[in-house]
Image (spheres, rainbow, N blue to C red):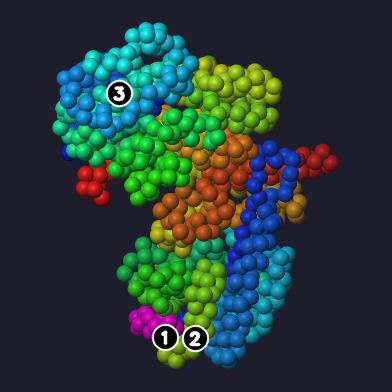
Amino acid sequence: MNKTVCFYFQVHQPDRLRQFRFFDIGNDAHYLDDFSNRTIVRRVAERCYLPANKLLLELILKHNGAFKVAFSISGAAIEQFERYTPEVIDSFKALAETGCVEFLAETYSHSLASLASTAEFKKQVKQHADLMKRVFGVKPTTFRNTELIYSDDIGETVAGMGYNVMLTEGAKHILGWKSPDFVYANALDPRLKVLLRNFNLSDDIAFRFSDQSWAGWPLTADKFADWSVAALAQGDVLNLFMDYETFGEHQRSASGIFDFMEALPAAILARGLEFCTPAEAAQKHQAVAPLNVPYPISWADEERDTSAWLGNELQEEAFNKLYSLEADIYKTKDEGLLAMFRRLQESDHFYYMCTKFFSDGSVHSYFNPYDTPYEAFINYMNVLADFELRVKEKLKVKKTTK
Amino acid sequence: MRVLMFGWEFPPHIAGGLGTACYGMTKGLAHAGVDVLFVMPSASGDEDQSCVRIINASDVAVSDSISQIDEYLGKVQFLRVGSNLHPYIDPVDFTDLVEEEQRSQSEEFKFYFRQKYKFSGKYGKNLMEEVSRYAMVGGAIAAREDFDVIHAHDWLTYHAGIAAKRVSGKPLVIHVHATSFDRGSADNIDTRVFAIEKRGMEEADKVITVSDLTRNIVINKYGIDPSKVVTVHNAVDFSGREKIEVERGVREKVITFLGRITFQKGPEYFIEAAAKVLKVCPETRFVMAGSGDMMNRCIRYVAKLGIADRFYFTGFLRGDDVQKMFALSDVYVMPSVSEPFGISPLEAMKTDVPTIISKQSGVAEVLKYAIKVDFWDVNALADAMYGLLNYPALPQLAAERGREEVDNLKWDAAAVKVRRVYESAVNGQ
């Protein structure tokens, strides 16, 4: 049986908040920084989404269906594409039509709901699946949680929703001596197969590609294909999971990342490996063992846990405050408030409040519009204070009109 | 290694942060294996001499080394300046305190080198005279003592350092704790002080600055070769300090400004931010502790904004009162327009008080857990105050991590860097 290489790319753009001072509380319900959201989405579309989609489409056509990839596109990203760069949606649709691209399910707003509220989590997954159906005409069967967050319980919930494959990180502290290059099964519900990211090879592309101090530099398609063969000598499936923005945004076009990707499929195929989407890979290979993950893991930072989002008091407070509003929001039955509730759940808001970034600096500061976690926290809490006022007001109005 | 160090003050008798910094540094240097001979204009004998030997310049009779004096007099031209000098650090009270002594001294003062001179060691009206005399004594001490390197703290001692260098031929390190640009605005600096500072920096083999902010000023405004300017951030020493218990009279949250009320400290930004916060959180109290030439203007401004019922002025605080004020505060703010380092945020953080500092302060370079804003950004300052008042996780985290952070700023570490500067000066690198 052929060994498998499985590519999945994450596409997400957060709804960045504008500078919201406390004197705006109660006076101004506009929370989003439209200018920077538009500017950034357009920039990334130009540097990454459009050229990368074009390249992938050419590769798929060139290899007659032997080259396959998967995307997970957050609802937040789709909304912003629809608003600012509809041509990006079209280019994803063109990829969808080849039949060689799998679209994964995730939470609509790239949220941490799986750590807060199962009910809210399920609603968002459903909302996202509906979106995929509406935009790309497919119903996802594979699930990937925000930041590859996974635990036995989350996996069980996901299996219960009818998904049979889930992706997560091949975290060392979970695997121990085991290899990420096999298919595993959820410990509570063995029907759910789990694919693990090979972080060494994934990060060779995503983080180290243009690092000239890295021993592997310059990374060529042949070199990488050889490494893939070596990895799969003891394994079934090599999972290369990364942010899609790797192409052209994190690794600039001038680094040669597009040329690398252009040459890679041929190099991999020439070595007798094949490409599968996550759904195909999970179907093709047997689960070798159940995977025990009692506490949530993720693909972030050295710790591979959830401490990048919920690692300090600021994050805990903001997070708890947000989800304490859940019940009231559903009582208002107000579409606008609900949509904003979802936006405020985006994991990025909590990431900005991370105090670890003094050590994990490079990655965090790249993604962060704030200078310090304090600023991020104060701004978010101001927005939340205003949001809470509006929810309360709405409830009052509802009560009096009844 | 042995260093001849020129300071202006040393605890317990101090007016500004300079004496405290010198004390901490000499202790750290002692641990780093450096002997310190500390020269100060007017020692009272109750200084802690466990780590240094203090030489009281007032006790040094210049006549006993007259030949050397004559020798170096030819090389060093002293500035004789009129005595109407703006004081260096100017709590109004100090002038009152030392005025009497100075008057008598001025009358007695004759340009005689062959006798002891009674320094006041303060920052009074005949400061320039004292600075010049101090330099003479510096030369005399340099001739009689044995040491490897000279270290002079701030412009008051630069001439003494230069004189000591000329007499002994040993390398000179000067330590810039503040510059003329931190005392006045850029177009209103004391040119006499500037000249002394520039000369000191030029003649020094190495210049130590207390922050990168100050380093940039030294390089850009004084035109000093960057390769000889090294930043060594200050540290703090809270050992032996007891926790003060205070009874809080008010239930409301207290936000405090503590420092000289001068243009450089940015008191007006504090007042403007206070007015903004009070609009939304009327149950907050603001305190401006300290005195200075802008105090009256600030009082009028507070009245004009109509917030005087929530805004208090304490006047100049001394001794324990400073610590009590911190203990009574829920938020400490230092909105300085320009601050070479700024030690008081560290005291606040040590007392578990969350702290907001301006990005234009040297201490911002070493603190991660203080909230930083641009001094001119009143909205950001107000927002930070509001956040600390209303979102409990914020002050909790800031206080907790802030204390840890301050506890880790050790003079021992700074002293090792200072020692390295000495070594490079001695080796001529």
The residue tagged 3 is B134
Q: Which residues are magenta?
A: A220-236
- Residue B138 lies, with reference to residue A81, above or below; the image says above
B324 or B214, which is in the foreground? B214
Q: Amino acid at mark 2?
A: Ala
Q: Residue at x 44, y 92 (%)?
A: A270
Foreground tag (2 vs 3):
3
Disc nearer the start of the sequence (1/2): 1
Counting the numbered discs, the total is: 3
- Asked which quadrant contains residue B377, the reply is top right
Chain label for disc 1: A
| Element assignment for label 3 | helix
Left or right side of A71 for A305: left
Question: Mark 1, residues whose alpha carbon is within 10 Å: few (<14), some, or many (≥20)?
Answer: some
Query: Do badges 2 and 3 share one subunit?
Result: no
Which element is circle 1 on? helix
Magenta span main SS = helix
Tell me the amino acid under the disc marked 1.
Asp
Residue under numbered circle 2: A263
Nearer the viewer's eye, disc 3 or disc 1?
3
Q: Are marks 1 and 2 on the same chain?
A: yes
Q: Callout 2: 10 Å neighbours few (<14), some, many (20+)?
A: some
Check whether the beta carbons of the residues at disc 1 and disc 2 lie within 8 A of each other.
yes
- Return the x and y of residue A336 as percentages of the image width and height: 75, 53
Check if residue B270 falls in the magenta segment. Answer: no
Closer to us: A123 or A299: A299
Tell me where residue B274 appears, x and y as whole percent. Answer: 62, 29
The answer to whether residue B357 is seen in the rendering is no
- Disc 1 marks which residue? A222
Nearer to us in this view, A260 or B115: B115
